[in-house]
Image (spheres, rainbow, N blue to C red):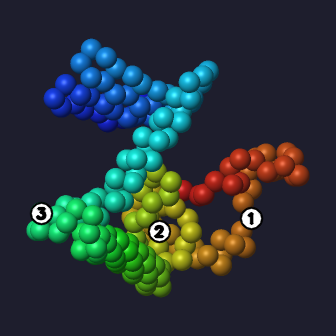
Amino acid sequence: MRLGIGGGAFGVRGGISTRGVGVGVGPFSAGTSWRGGGGGGGGYVAWVILAGVFLLIVAWPYLLGTYIAVQCGAWNPSTGRFVVGWIFEVVYIAALVGWFLTARAKNARRAAQDANRLASLQASGAVYETKSGNSVVYRHGTCTTNHRSADAAARCTKSDHEKSLVPVHTSSDTENPGEQGPRAHRAAIT
C-alpha cells in the first residue's frame, strides 16, 4: 500500500511516500526510489532529504529563536542570536520531555486503576463484561469461563477450583489418548 504526502506552490512541487521522493519545477521533475536500484545512488538522495526533514523538525525552535533575535536587533552572527536560539531549543526539548513523562505517568496510573477495578470486580463475584479476542463475553468472580450472556454468567455456579479438577475431554481424546483435539485448547463458552 502506497502512503505519502505532497504538495506544491509557485510552480514548485514535491512529495515523499513509501515508494520514494520526488520534486518538480514546471514541466521538469525528478524522483528517486527508496530501494536505490541499478545505479546513480538514488537511495542516498532520499536518505539525505529525509535527514534534512528530520533536522528541520528538531531544529525549528533554534531557527525561530535566531530569527526573532535578529528581528529584535541582534547582529546576524552574534552571541546574543546564538543564546536566544538555544534558549528556544532547550525550552522545546524540556517541553517534549515533560509531555512524554506526564503521558507515561498518566498511562501507568490508568493501567493501575483498571487492574484495581478488575480485581475488585473479581473479588465481588459480580457479572462483568470483558473482551476475549474480538468477542464481548461475560464473566463472574474468578470464573475463567467465557459466557455468551450476562444471564448465563449469573447462572454459572462453578468456581475456578472445581473447573481445575474436571479434565477437558473430547471425542478425539477417547479414540487417541496421546493426542488432544483442537477443542481441548479453546476457551469454553457457555
Q: Residues within 10 Å of mark 1 (few under 14, many from 20)?
A: few
Q: Which residue is mark 2?
A: 139
Q: Earlier in the sequence, mark 3 or mark 2?
A: 3
Q: Is residue 97 above or below residue 123?
A: above
Earlier residue among tags 3 and 1: 3
* Residue 71, numbered label: 3
Left or right: where does residue 117 sit relative to residue 69?
A: right
Tell me which residue sits at (74%, 56%) in the image: 169
Which amino acid lies under the numbered mark 1 shown in the image of this protein?
Pro
Q: As shown in the figure, which amino acid type bears the numbered disc 3?
A: Gln
Residue on which the image places disc 1: 167
Q: Which mark's residue is nearer the viewer, 1 or 2?
A: 2
Residue 44 or residue 122, whichever sits in front = 44
Image coordinates for residue 139, horizontal then vertical, percent: 47, 68
| Vertical arrangement, residue 49 with respect to residue 73, above or below | above
Return the x and y of residue 146 as percentages of the image width and height.
52, 61
The answer to whether mark 3 and mark 1 are in CB contact below 8 A is no
Three-letter code for the amino acid on which mark 2 is drawn: Arg
